[in-house]
Image: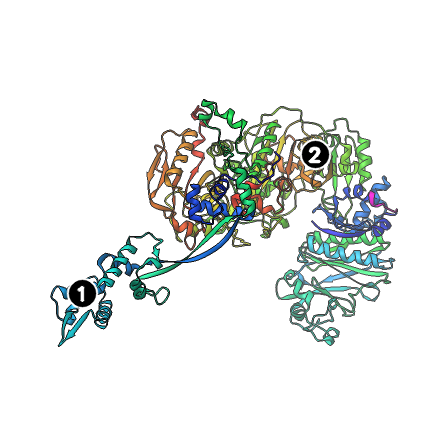
Amino acid sequence: MASEAPILSPHEVRILQAAIHGNESTIEAIAGDAGLDPAQVRSAIESLKAREYVELTREETLRRAVATDLGRRFAEIGTPELAILAKVAAGETQVAACQDVPGHDRRALGTAFGFLKKEGYLEVQNGRVARSSRDEADLSGAADAFRRLGAASDEGLDWEDLPEFFRAQYQPKKRGSSDAAVELRETVTRWYRLTPSGVAAASALEGAREAPAELTREMLRSGEWREILATTGFRPYKIAEAPIPVVGRRDPYREFLDGVKRKLLALGFEEMTGSLVETEFWDMDALFLPQFHPAREIHDVYFVADGEGGYASQSEVGAAERASIEAVAREHEGRGVSDSRGWGYEFDRDRTRRLVLRSQGTVLSARWLARPDLKNPGKYFAMARCFRYDTVDATHAPDFFQIEGIVVSEHTSFRHLLGLLELFAIEIAGAKELRFLPAYFPFTEPSVEIHVEHPQLGWMELGGAGVFRPEVTRPHGVETPVIAWGLGLDRMAMIALGIGDIRELFSNNVPAGLQSLRDRRAC
Amino acid sequence: MPTIDVSLSDLSGLVGTRLAPADVERHLTLVKGERKRASGDEDLRVELQDTNRPDLWCVEGIARQIRFWLARKKDWRAEYGFFESPGALAGTIEVDASVESVRPYVAGLVARGWKVDDAGLRAFIQTQETLCRNFGRKRATVAIGVYDGARLRFPVRYEAVPQESRTRAFVPLPPTDLPAGVAPERWKGPWTPAEILRDHPTGREYAAALPGDRAPILVDAASVVLSFPPIINSATLGRVEPGMDDLFVEVTGTVLDHVLLTANILAANLRDRGAAIHPVTTLYPFDTPRGREVATPHPLPEKRLLSVGLERFRTVLGEPALGADDVRANLRAYGLAVSDEGDRVRVEAPPWRSDYLHEVDAVEDFAISRGYESFPARMPEEFTVGRLASSTDLADRARDRLIGYGFEEAITNILTEERLLRAAMNLAEGFSGASRFPGREMVRIANVMNASYACLRDWLLPSLLEVESHSAGAVYPHRIFEAGEVAVPDPSAPLRSQTEQRVAGLVAHELASFTEAQAYLNLLLRHLGAMDYILVPAEHPTFLPGRFALVQLPGSKDAVGVVGELHPEVLAGEQGFGIRVPCSAFELALAPFGGGGASRRPS
């Protein structure tokens, strides 16, 4: 819609219309004329000023008097001066007794007594106090002023409107002085008027009906909408500024992972889950990682703190698990059923019970191989949270997901593994180009890495895989081939989420919290 | 995984043919080498993946594997016969009983006839460093020394002396950059082993490789010190320079077979450079796994001979029609010695390898030699049912519900710090949780690297509050949730803890109240199929008194969840999260709602 003037908000329109007479007005006056709150006018005025429709003509500082706590007390029980005069009027003649009025501070009464004497309201002769003839109108006026202040709102009263005597007597000497009965607050009043272009804009509006904002039921019922559309139309929206509603939504990273999960389900994989805490046996020994392997040292794996928590309970190790441990121990020592030469060292059975934080998702595959209900053929996957002993930085999160699994089948092989990886490349990474490279993992042979050409990242490693070594499968009585695979999807997730720091995959490390999550593009 | 620098011209020279940069990628697959991004066309940086093949962690090893493959038919025996038919002994090393408890094993060999050049020397030093660091555990289990063989007199003696002893004090090789703290003339005089460990930069760097208070020393027949293994060579005999053509190489260590394997790798490398290898025998006064008299290079026969059935190749690789000729030809092209044994193939790897544990290891060598690209992918042929674990299914149902209620999902780290789980939640030290929200203890890490990651979370709400604490800039209301795992210690469990799937929700805005959290929790519980839960008012320091309840299911006093209005101490207190709006929250363990979930699911 072509338009000569910028679109004005309804508040701005009302202000222009209210101020078209060209006289200067205050915010409050405009608010009254336009039927708006002063706060609404204040914000709209700034916008009109920026458009040079309105200019500031002058400003005036006003002083407002507000009763302090002391002033409020005076409003309630009167001033000390009047209290003393009342006592005297009631017949009191003793100097000391005159200065004893409940509710008033003793020192204030002393000061008031001195003032009354000095100003000639009282006479003291031979220790006896007497009322003079001086009129007490000023004093009553002051007390009355306190009553008005006490009844006034937080805004107080215009200082200049208060009696002269009151102002001379109670003007606070110091800011925030504790014995002051009145506090002075300065407020600035500004006057505005329309500029010539403001007048022009207002004239343009003159006579024009304000375009209604909403289509109402009433308009539909009465048919008024026809007339509106023929004349003013409905107020157009500032389309770019539509607010984003707060709605329920998935976490973007979780959404990415959900997508992968769906793909794996569609490919016929069944999910494996397990404990965050594992034994060294399942995490490493069962995967044929020799106990002297450097990757098993304290600089690579988190160990659970000592005490009874440091080792798996021996009494709770079932017969089946004990048999697994023995069978695996024999593989390491070269006496196992797989006919492997083994690593040729003495296997430490105590170490199998040591507890670690799950360092790799493959631990679940190892556990599944030992299950009596392992399916054959069977396809399994896990999205397991894992922990590595690493400095946490932009490329290492404190914990991370590993996505991996196995295929158990009489009819599976290295070539089937390549086929499966190809499916992953197409289905999960959306890759058109891929290649297979020889790789090394202690628990697979042959081992392979799949590299794919990602639309944004270029060539990247999508994952590692291989045929489980017989030393890994045979101890659990699994005679059929098992192929194992793992996918590294964090970099893909980071691209999908538009982030450069891996820690920010997790919501607790996102700098602007919920706002960042809301701003993230959907995967 | 070691990464080494390789110059293409040196590699080409060793292979015997000029390699084009474009060919390198294919050739590197033979050694599981990945060309790193920092590589140029001439100066390559290569990462070697196979931690079981230290023979490939050097330019000579890489070149050898490529050379075999290009030649196709020459197995390793053709060029490296000296492993099995050693020539005349070059000398002996006499071991003193004193080293047995310090660093018992030593192996040596003499390489003559190769005039040391810059490229070869640089490569040798890099190999020495790579092997000692990655295979020798920073010299602790294997260390290498090389010496001017022309000036050294056999027999060499290997003994251990007290580190403070002056009897074997010697002039060590100075470091490349002389440290400021040592007077220049000091480098010309003799040092005791203790002084080296204390004042010499190399001594300080590797002191950890040598436990105990004794120092192994190699000394020749004329009492000239060769070195103080595994720390440093002497400046007298242990300085090798271009132009020399007679080298003595020794390897010391704590595992005999690792020492011998290292010596074999170095022997093959020096052979590749053009040297003739002359054996050296070590005489031990104590028993070793290979007797008291051990010659180097050693044939190490045990872990390199495999008899592999053809059927093994066929089933593992998925090629039922694979022929024996194909297998033999490609194994040979990988440098392996191959012979027939009926329907089996006898494969013999060279003595610089010790990774033949199982038949499958030869199967992989075959596959690599033929090239992975020569194996057409086969798609899965069997039907299997895809299925989520019941805990995930349950969590997903809870997630769907909460998103429907307008909650925004969070996913947070499980590894965290105790402060967030306890003090920030207004729980005093020694808080004895009556419920599992949280319990008394948590799973802690023994080898903490960073105090911020010292334990596993045992409830979810601290994670949500952490997210909320960063979210003041987001338009309110905030309704956040997470479905995730926590670890709850349980001394009677086999793993001493239980991993629980939970869901927690947090409501944060001006008017957030107990009632609102309770309302969402009620809805969720009903949607999870629990119609008869009970909310029991209770007290909990994390929540405002009078505004907290435990969720119980009939028949059990154990709470399955909590709901409450968060205590201001948690939001804005000194230890709290710095949150400036009222919050209410709930947390629920999901497992109790899993059993027969489908049938209990409301329609």
Q: Which mark is residue A482?
A: none
| Front tag of 1 and 2 | 1
Q: List x then y, in percent, for residue B220.
A: 77, 66
Labels 1 & 2 near each other (Cβ < 8 A)? no
Given the image, on which type of amino acid does mark 1 rest? Leu
According to the picture, the residue beneath numbered tag 2 turns out to be A431
Q: List x then y, in percent, for residue B376.
A: 75, 30
Q: List x then y, in percent, for residue A293.
A: 63, 49
Chain containing the residue with disc 1: A
Please give left or right for residue B116 compared with residue B399 in the image: right
Answer few, some or many: residues within 10 Å of disc 1's Cα (few below 14, many 20 plus, some between 14 and 19). Answer: many
Residue plotted at (79% across, 57% down): B124
Answer few, some or many: residues within 10 Å of disc 2's Cα (few below 14, many 20 plus, some between 14 and 19). Answer: some
Above or below, comparing residue B556 to residue B3 in the picture: above
Quadrant the N terminus of chain A occupies? top right
Given the image, on which type of amino acid does mark 2 rest? Ala
Q: List x then y, in percent, for residue A177.
A: 34, 65
Q: Nearer the viewer, residue B32 or B171?
A: B32
Magenta residues (range) = B17-22
Q: Is residue B20 magenta?
A: yes
According to the picture, the residue beneath numbered tag 1 turns out to be A85
Please give left or right for residue A481 compared with residue A242 in the image: right
How was the colour assigned to the protein in this rendering? rainbow
